[in-house]
Amino acid sequence: MTAASTQTTVTDAWVDAFTTGDPDAVIACYAPDVVIDMNVPQWRFQVQGRAAAREVIVQEEFVPGRHATFVAKTLTEDGFLVELECRAEMHGEEHLWRSIHRLVVEGSFITEHVAYCTGIWDAETIERQQVEAPMVRAW
């Protein structure tokens, strides 16, 4: 298997697991010493290792009822980028967030995962955004 095909296999496995909310399958894509660097509004933190990565993914990404409404992946020289829009019902109303994930692949594992997230928008924020800054195109 070539490096490019290994990278594509890891990419496809991670994207499928992440968008469907399967933490064990996500973690299987990570190297044992993976570093996750989370960048959320007004905050940033890092963890290292599969156990810590699983905890972060479950707590920060896999909100109950979450579903991906937009996914785009782009292979890079050393891994891939994934753009996501997710939605979930929380407190009786729809919430949404958008994120970019930069993943570095070495061999057949992801060694680094850097995430940038908009934060979770509540229904009032979604409505205000639609009124004050309507989108030119919808996903």
Image (tube, rainbow, N blue to C red):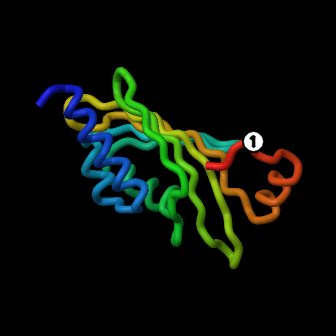
Q: Position of residue 30 (x, y in %)?
A: 29, 43
Looking at the image, the residue that sits furthest to the bottom is 92
Q: Nearer the viewer, residue 118 or 128?
A: 128
- Mark 1, residues whose alpha carbon is within 10 Å: few (<14), some, or many (≥20)? few
Left or right: where 109 falls relative to 132: left
Query: Which quadrant: the N terminus?
Result: top left
What residue type is disc 1 on?
Val
Q: Quadrant of residue 36?
A: top left
Q: Nearer the viewer, residue 60 or 135?
A: 135
Q: Position of residue 75 (x, y in %)?
A: 38, 30
Give the residue displayed 54% in from the left and 57% down from the top. Answer: 69
Looking at the image, the residue that sits furthest to the left is 1
Q: Position of residue 66 (x, y in %)?
A: 52, 65
Looking at the image, the residue that sits furthest to the top is 77
Left or right: where 89 falls relative to 114: right
Looking at the image, the residue that sits furthest to the right is 132
Residue 37 in sight: no
Up/down of 60 relative to 65, above or below: above
Residue 83 in sight: yes
Looking at the rendered structure, the number of numbered marks drawn on it comes to 1
Left or right: where 96 falls relative to 54: right
Give the residue displayed 53% in from the left and 51% down from the top. Answer: 70
Give the residue displayed 82% in from the left and 63% down from the top. Answer: 124
Secondary structure state at the residue bearing disc 1: loop
Give the residue displayed 88% in from the left and 48% down from the top. Answer: 132
Query: Circle 1 sits on which residue?
Result: 136
